[in-house]
Image: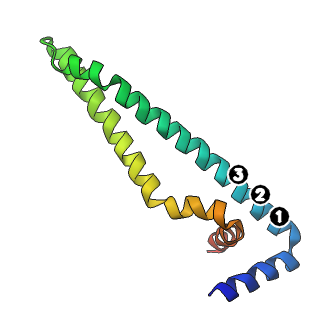
Amino acid sequence: MEELIKKLIELVENASPKLWELAMRQVIVNNISNIVLLLALVVYVYLCIKFTPKFVKLAHDDDIDRNIFGMMVLIVCWVVAVASILMVLVNTSTLLTGFVNPEYAAIYNLLQLVK
């Protein structure tokens, strides 16, 4: 399999150097956007952790409106955080492929375009 991928990379590099250059640039763009999204997720989870005690106080307030607001904010905040973390865990191999083996990621992206 690895030999076939190397042959395919050589074929694309020789047949269309411009296409290969664009595919490699796209891998770099994807890597940068993945880093930015991971940093945003870290900041988001940090803010969830920081503000959770404040919203727990609101959730235990005697005023029913504040109670409901505090509970809703806590639930939505943590559901989004957990879903985002799960997405990162599921896509870890894709994230790492762009850094470890950018040629493979470029070929993969080109094959996805053909499909």
Residue pictured at 42% horizontal, 31% vertical? 46
Residue 16 image position (x, y, % from top left): 86, 74
- Amino acid of disc 2: Arg
Contact, CB < 8 Å: mark 2 with mark 3? Answer: yes
Indicate whether 26 appears above or below 45: below
Residue pictured at 83% horizontal, 75% vertical? 13
Residue at numbered disc 1: 21
- Amino acid of disc 3: Val
Left or right: 40, with 82 as reference point:
right
Furthest-left residue in this view? 62
Residue 38 image position (x, y, % from top left): 53, 44
Element assignment for label 1: helix
Left or right: 108, with 79 as reference point:
right
Mark 1, other Cα within 10 Å: few <14 / some 14–19 / many ≥20:
few
Estimate the spatial distance between the alpha carbons at disc 2 and disc 3, rounded to whole Å.
6 Å
Residue at numbered disc 2: 25
